[in-house]
Image (tube, coloured by chain):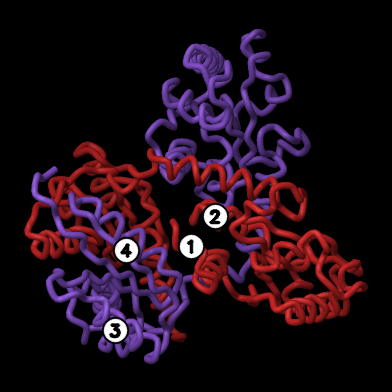
Chain colours: A red, B purple
Amino acid sequence: MTDKKLPMRQVYIVSDGTGLTAEALARSVLSQFEIPFQKIRYPFIDTPEKIQEVTEHLRQNRSHDAPRPIVFSTLVKPELLSILHQADALHIDVIQPLISKLAKELGTQAKQEIGLSHQQAASGEYEDRIDAIQFSIAHDDGQSHANLEAADIILLGVSRSGKTPTSLYLAIQYGLKAANYPLIPEDFERGRLPSVLQPFKRKLFGLSINPVRLSQIRSVRLPNSKYASIDNCRYEIQEAETIMEKEGISWLSSTNKSVEEIAATIVHQTGIGKRV
Amino acid sequence: MTDKKLPMRQVYIVSDGTGLTAEALARSVLSQFEIPFQKIRYPFIDTPEKIQEVTEHLRQNRSHDAPRPIVFSTLVKPELLSILHQADALHIDVIQPLISKLAKELGTQAKQEIGLSHQQAASGEYEDRIDAIQFSIAHDDGQSHANLEAADIILLGVSRSGKTPTSLYLAIQYGLKAANYPLIPEDFERGRLPSVLQPFKRKLFGLSINPVRLSQIRSVRLPNSKYASIDNCRYEIQEAETIMEKEGISWLSSTNKSVEEIAATIVHQTGIGKRV
């Protein structure tokens, strides 16, 4: 942290596609600096006319006393890039230097066509992903016991430990059939797994969470309830972890982890993502 | 396409985080070349010991007659990168050149800390995203009419036009409350929108799809059915597009688009993503 107030820097993200890759990379790089950034996205910039318009916006948005903007671009056509480069900015070309390096290594030319990275979506992979999403929705929060043997993974944890978003992310990003099942007070009284899950023990993966954080999350939904109280959250988490340890179920703590990180950790630890 | 058989190139994706950004970028760059690649992911490589192990794998996996592998890395700690660089490979360092450029421009040092880009996940954004996901699940396929006024968007289209994955992707990636509602034969007989949707016309966005593609997708689920027949798919699509045109509802064709592209296009066209 610095004491002097730093000026807000404008950051433009210009892509001939969705811009999601450029934005993720920009977020990752910018997070390394203690400076406020204002991000402006321009997706689907795929013609000379559109890139001309963006270049014009860059010029117009610039106030005289502000530092020059930063532009992250993923444009596969060099002719579009050269128009953008006419704007006064720090240009961070995310893709062309990588394409050049690879073309030299592979001894072949790049195709310079837009949208190629999404083409595999038209193959059977698309149906698999849809099936995985439908499965994960149908098996959210223990709603259905039918066809649990088809699950790639079954997430287990107390209410609000992150099971639902993680299941859906596993389905959407990794094409995995991810069911999830809640651990509830009745399970703690019995001190063992719900019996419906017993046959699928090797598919189970647990999510735990810091009780203070859990209490915060639950309080948004039901303030001043027993459900959200710190004592109850401590009790549920301790019981859930005890059951998981006793049954030999791998688990992780979702505290301070993004959904992306939780999902990637599960895929990494279990090895279930290999087929995708 | 070339006639001679090209050797499979090994591609390593080495990251100190989830590796998703590095992988998306690698996919985007590699798609520009007509060469078969075999991708191997190493996420969460965040200590000298782990990077040493990956470097060792790189050495061992290399057969003498194979061309050197390609390594995409997103490692924010230079000391980890320098260990990786000992391996014989084409190194494509995705992040360090960008950090150097920015440090120079901003006149400040990078923090070189791992995992910073996920930290915002701990803020209120996390709860918003969870709420959006719960909302989208509850309002999948017209299941609930309750609280539709809270929706950021309501997707509309015939069965299997891509509504469910798009809704969930909008929730997970953009934090948007995305309901979806099917157009069914009864709507086509009446030739107008389901009446429950009339009050929310400005929130509606349509998905259409090429009838041949729709018939393929439906045939996976119900082969040789009227539901999947090309005649019925042509009829449903024509009627759905007629209703959407008549009611002045914006729509796009999901044919040949990935879920990411459909979602990004909707956000771009409607401007609903601005608040995220």
Looking at the image, do the residues carrying marks 2 and 1 touch, with CB atoms under 8 Å apart? Answer: yes
* Residue B17 on image: x %, y %: 44, 74
Q: Amino acid at mark 4?
A: Lys
Q: How many marks?
A: 4
Q: Are marks 2 and 4 on the same chain?
A: no
Q: Chain of mark 2?
A: A
Q: Is residue B179 above or below residue A188?
A: above
At 84% from the left and 73% from the top, the residue drawn is A192
In the image, what residue type sits under mark 2?
A: Leu
Closer to the camera in the image, A220 or B233: B233
Instruction: Say if mark 3 contacts mark 4, CB within 8 Å.
Output: no
Horizontal relation, residue B265 to residue A171: left or right: left
Which secondary structure lies at badge 3? Answer: helix
Mark 1 to mark 4 CA distance (whole Å): 13 Å
Which amino acid does the dot numbered 1 rest on? Gly
Q: Quadrant of the N terminus of chain B?
A: top left
Q: Is residue A212 visible?
A: no
- Vertical position of residue B231 compared to residue A84: above or below: above
